[in-house]
Image: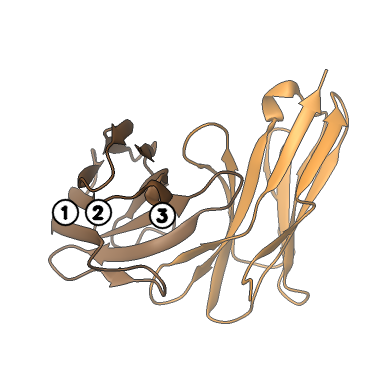
Chain colours: A brown, B orange
Amino acid sequence: GAVVSQHPSWVICKSGTSVKIECRSLDFQATTMFWYRQFPKQSLMLMATSNEGSKATYEQGVEKDKFLINHASLTLSTLTVTSAHPEDSSFYICSATSGGAKTQYFGPGTRLLVL
Amino acid sequence: EDKVVQSPLSLVVHEGDTVTLNCSYEVTNFRSLLWYKQEKKAPTFLFMLTSSGIEKKSGRLSSILDKKELFSILNITATQTGDSAIYLCAQLQTGANNLFFGTGTRLTVIP
């Protein structure tokens, strides 16, 4: 089956620093990748949708200048949390789908803790 | 306004019990309804339902979609402690391939 990896699996950083999270599709080409955020005891909230080679589409309420998304290749998308604050602490999950696929394949997630 | 609503929010049962989890969704741009199981990490795919009235089954889990009443149920029979997880349903919309998740049902199965 399709495999999606994320790196790092967890990160602790100081407030004000930037953190980059990578999402890779290991055995298929992901034309579209999605980034979700999940706060404790809440469901997954879609942050943005990125298509390879084009700008990401952000959901309402998600700051595009704070959460920078790059999808430069068919196997890699990155999410950079700029000037992170404690309220950005969350579980970030990416998913990927290839052209024609009906389901999304999720990465294992990245736990971010901002001190 | 929630697009996908799940009930109950949490459920505690004993091993061997049968549970039914509910998910209602919006009709707007509906393509499919998906069920996921989430333990400690990212969700794992269970079912995708597109057609009404056709039950999908995998072991002790089964699911069905009612497109007239805009809901789906996930059944788990003979529950085991390993079934303890958050069960998420999500609506897949046409066009953008976006998944909109419900709030999830936290199932706890006690020995």
The outermost residue toward the bottom is B28
Which disc, if any, is residue A74?
1
Image coordinates of residue B27 in percent, x first then y, are: 63, 79
Spatial distance from mark 3 to mark 1, Cα to Cα? 19 Å
Label for residue A30? Answer: 2
Q: Report the residue at 76% width, 32% height from top.
A: B108
Q: Is residue A109 above or below residue B109?
A: below
Quick one: label 3 or label 2, which is nearer the N terminus?
Answer: 2
Q: Residues within 10 Å of mark 3 (few under 14, many from 20)?
A: some
Of badges 3 and 2, nearer the viewer stands: 3
Residue A40 figure quarter? top right
- Which labelled disc corresponds to residue A36? 3
Question: Answer yes or no: do the residues labelled 2 and 1 have beta carbons within 8 Å?
Answer: yes
Q: Earlier in the sequence, mark 3 or mark 1?
A: 3
User: Disc 1 residue type?
Assistant: Leu
Secondary structure at numbered mark 2: loop
Q: Chain of mark 1?
A: A
Q: Amino acid at mark 3?
A: Tyr
